[in-house]
Each structure stands twice: as C-alpha cells, then as structure tokens.
Image (spheres, rainbow, N blue to C red):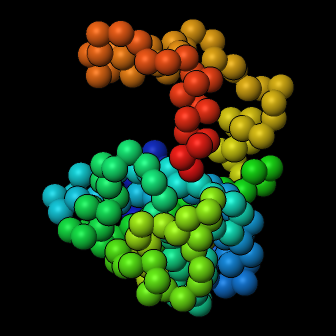
Amino acid sequence: MSAPEPLPGYRPPNQAALDKEVDRLDRHCQAFIRQSPWLTLATSDAGGFPDVSPRGGEPGFVKVLDEHRLVLPDRPGNDRVDSLRNVTANPRVALMFVVPGVQETLRVYGAASVVPPDEVGPDLTEFGRPPRSALVVQVRRAYFQCARSLLRSGLWDPERWPGRGDLAPMGEVFRDHCRLPAPLPADDVLHADLVQNL
C-alpha cells in the first residue's frame, strides 16, 4: 500500500503500518476471531450517516467461512435493527474484534449482506436458539491495531477501572431519556431480565 498524503501536523505513516494491511483473513486473523467474544460493527445509511453497534457471544461466535468471508449472527436486541437497515442500503461495514486481556485489536473491512441463518453453513445456534438473521461479510481489508489505545486506557487493568462514580442507575437514565413517569426497576432486576433473554 502506498502512503497517503499526511495531514498538517502529522508525519507520514511508516511502511510497516501500511504493510500490515492484508486483503484476506490470514491464519492470524482467523485465530483472533475464534478467540473474540466481543466486537463493534460500524455501518452507515444510504446518506453516509454512521452507526456503531456492540456485538457479543461465546468466543468464536463469529464464524470464518474462508479467507474472504465471515458470518456474524444477529441475536435478539432492541429490535431497532439499525445495522441491518443500514446494510440493506449501504453494504460497507467495518468490524473491530476484541479479545479480553489482549492489548491489540483486529480491524476488518468489507461488504455485508443480510441472509437467513440456515443459508450460511455453520450452525449459529447459541444460548439455545438460532439467530434471527446473519450478516455475511465479504472481506476486503484486515489489519491488527497496535496496543497503544488499550494501554493508555488500562482497560484490562482492574486497578485502573474508574467504577460507576456519579453515573446514575440505568433505570433512572432510561426514565429520563424516555420521559417516563416513574423509574424502571433497579439495575440488578434489569440485568437479570437481560440474562434471561440472551
């Protein structure tokens, strides 16, 4: 990959930062995806307005079909289906895979399509139920992101976790955001309900 023009105040990227980008899921990318229980999925609508959605499951819940395709199951959520609506209008997607305790992340870019889960081959059943649909991503680019951001954040260091601080209980947050007349149940009750409906 050739170096892009640097922005004012920035140096050109070194060649290693450019050369680490590959056009497929090599064995290292595939191994990382098999270990990952969590990712972010970035999409945008037809007008280019972006959205990012967290996705999680057991390690390896995203299945690699081959070097150029992976499949992401869609589990029950809030039924807004923002990501799925976006993909039907604009197939370009970006995914960032995270493995707890590993400082590097994996970034994958490609074009996605929404398909019935029984059309993809591997069994996507998890938590006792199949997904409602699946995203098949045709991989165009992939590369490992260096560890700087996670080292700066101390994300995997419990001694640096800030705790809830002055964050209100989520029942109160949802009440205020949704302009409800009374607060929702306590957070432990909300979380127990979520666990029952994974």
- Say left or right for 195 vs 83: right
Is residue 120 shown above or below 99? below
- Say left or right for 187 vs 94: right
Q: Position of residue 154 (x, y in %)?
A: 74, 35
Question: Closer to the camera, 187 or 39?
Answer: 187
Question: Closer to the camera, 94 or 60?
Answer: 60
Q: How many marks?
A: 0
Instruction: Quadrant for residue 90, please give it.
Output: bottom left
- Say left or right for 64 vs 180: right
Q: Position of residue 6 (x, y in %)?
A: 43, 59
Residue at x 45% of width, y 78% of height: 117
Is residue 10 shown above or below 84? above
Is residue 104 shown above or below 88? above
| Residue 121 visible, this orientation | yes
| Residue 140 visible, this orientation | no
Residue at x 77% of width, y 26% of height: 160
Residue at x 72% of width, y 84% of height: 27
Is residue 133 shown above or below 6? below
Residue at x 44% of width, y 72% of height: 134
Q: Position of residue 119 (x, y in %)?
A: 44, 87
Q: Position of residue 17 (x, y in %)?
A: 61, 67
Question: Closer to the camera, 108 or 195?
Answer: 195
